[in-house]
Image (tube, rainbow, N blue to C red):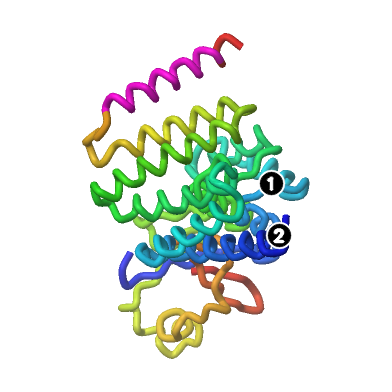
């Protein structure tokens, strides 16, 4: 890794730590600002397929979830799709963990008692069932 | 609780011993052998076997995949919850269990600010009247309502 890329990664790590603390303190707007900057830095310096983006997206999703608003929940689900795509690669050798990831995304499509994309949740459920059946046969 | 503080007994020496493991878990990267040993210890504790702390469910997942970086498959909330469960299980007396029905138990006491009869005691002023200095804050758990401040005394250690 080049010196400038290394510096960028360190900067992103620092921003993520601050965002994590801000979420814990319910300073959600601060957390969102920090995590968006960290995400932009990581995408620019590491590429949009790097597994380090998973944690950044998780922080982003968590901050949005704590806002507990329908529009935030929708954005969290959109980010959850990005996170799942990255996890499919990172967890290729751990199908049991991919099951958890599918369930997490299904939860993101639910706000209070409303499912805002039932078709997508059904797709995820079918994939989860297939994964569990495969593991059951193994 | 409002206007009340929960004081619990902690083994601060044990906390210091596992602090490097807690730091490594907090970083949410791949874990070293010593941290995995701490996780195996907590996995065999009654708290996990009796499912008394939800956060500790992540311990089994980590031990199933020690090769993975935590940040790839766990959420920040899951990591925070696991660290809290781990500190409770390994460092707090009685697994940090307490009852809101009984204000005095084997390892906890609930103090109410209305008990001003204690105001002449240093420890009471320390708890209720002194600003809580960050230096006294227990490093973990660090999230939300699960935070503790350490009341240092020569003969014992308590956390609130």
Q: Position of residue A91 (x, y in %)?
A: 59, 32
Among the 4 quarters of the image, the one containing residue A135: top right
- In this orientation, which residue lies closer to the viewer: B112 or B151? B151
Q: Secondary structure at mark 1?
A: loop
Please report the residue visible at 40 percent of the width from the left and 35 percent of the height from the top: A105
Q: Position of residue B6 (x, y in %)?
A: 43, 66
Instruction: Determine which of the numbered discs, if any, sits on residue B20 in the image.
Output: 2
Among the 4 quarters of the image, the one containing residue A32: bottom left
Span highlighted in magenta in the image: A118-134
Among the 4 quarters of the image, the one containing residue A22: bottom left
- In this orientation, which residue lies closer to the viewer: A4 or A22? A4
Please report the residue visible at 56 percent of the width from the left and 40 percent of the height from the top: B73
- In this orientation, which residue lies closer to the viewer: B127 or A56? A56
Q: Position of residue B25 (x, y in %)?
A: 63, 52
Question: Pointer 1: what residue?
Answer: B30
Sort mark 2 into few (<14), some (14-19) or many (20+) by Cα contacts within 10 Å: few
Q: Position of residue B51 (x, y in %)?
A: 50, 38
Please report the residue visible at 64 percent of the width from the left and 44 percent of the height from the top: B69
């Amino acid at each position: 890794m080049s010196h400038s890329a290394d510096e960028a990664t360190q900067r992103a790590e620092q921003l993520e730590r601050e965002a994590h603390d801000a979420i814990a303190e319910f300073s959600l707007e601060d957390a969102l600002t920090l995590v968006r900057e960290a995400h932009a830095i990581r995408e620019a310096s590491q590429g949009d397929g790097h597994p380090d983006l998973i944690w950044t997206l998780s922080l982003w999703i968590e901050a949005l979830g704590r806002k507990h608003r329908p529009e935030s929940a929708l954005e969290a689900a959109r980010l959850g799709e990005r996170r799942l795509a990255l996890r499919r690669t990172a967890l290729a050798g751990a199908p049991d963990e991919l099951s958890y990831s599918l369930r997490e995304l299904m939860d993101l499509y639910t706000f209070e008692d409303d499912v805002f994309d039932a078709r997508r949740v059904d797709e995820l459920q079918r994939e989860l069932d297939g994964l569990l059946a495969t593991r059951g046969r193994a | 609780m409002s206007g009340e503080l929960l004081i619990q007994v902690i083994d601060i020496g044990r906390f210091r011993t596992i602090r490097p493991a807690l730091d490594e878990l907090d970083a949410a990267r791949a874990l070293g052998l010593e941290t995995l040993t701490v996780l195996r210890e907590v996995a065999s504790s009654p708290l996990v076997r009796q499912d008394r702390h939800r956060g500790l469910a992540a311990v089994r997942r980590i031990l199933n995949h020690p090769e993975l970086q935590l940040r790839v498959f766990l959420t920040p909330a899951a990591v925070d919850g696991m660290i809290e469960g781990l500190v409770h299980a390994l460092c707090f007396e009685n697994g940090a269990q307490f009852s809101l029905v009984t204000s005095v138990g084997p390892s906890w006491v609930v103090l109410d600010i209305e008990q001003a009869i204690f105001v002449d005691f240093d420890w009471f002023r320390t708890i209720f009247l002194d600003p809580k200095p960050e230096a006294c804050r227990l490093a973990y758990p660090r999230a939300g309502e699960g935070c503790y401040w350490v009341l240092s005394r020569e003969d014992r250690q308590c956390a609130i």
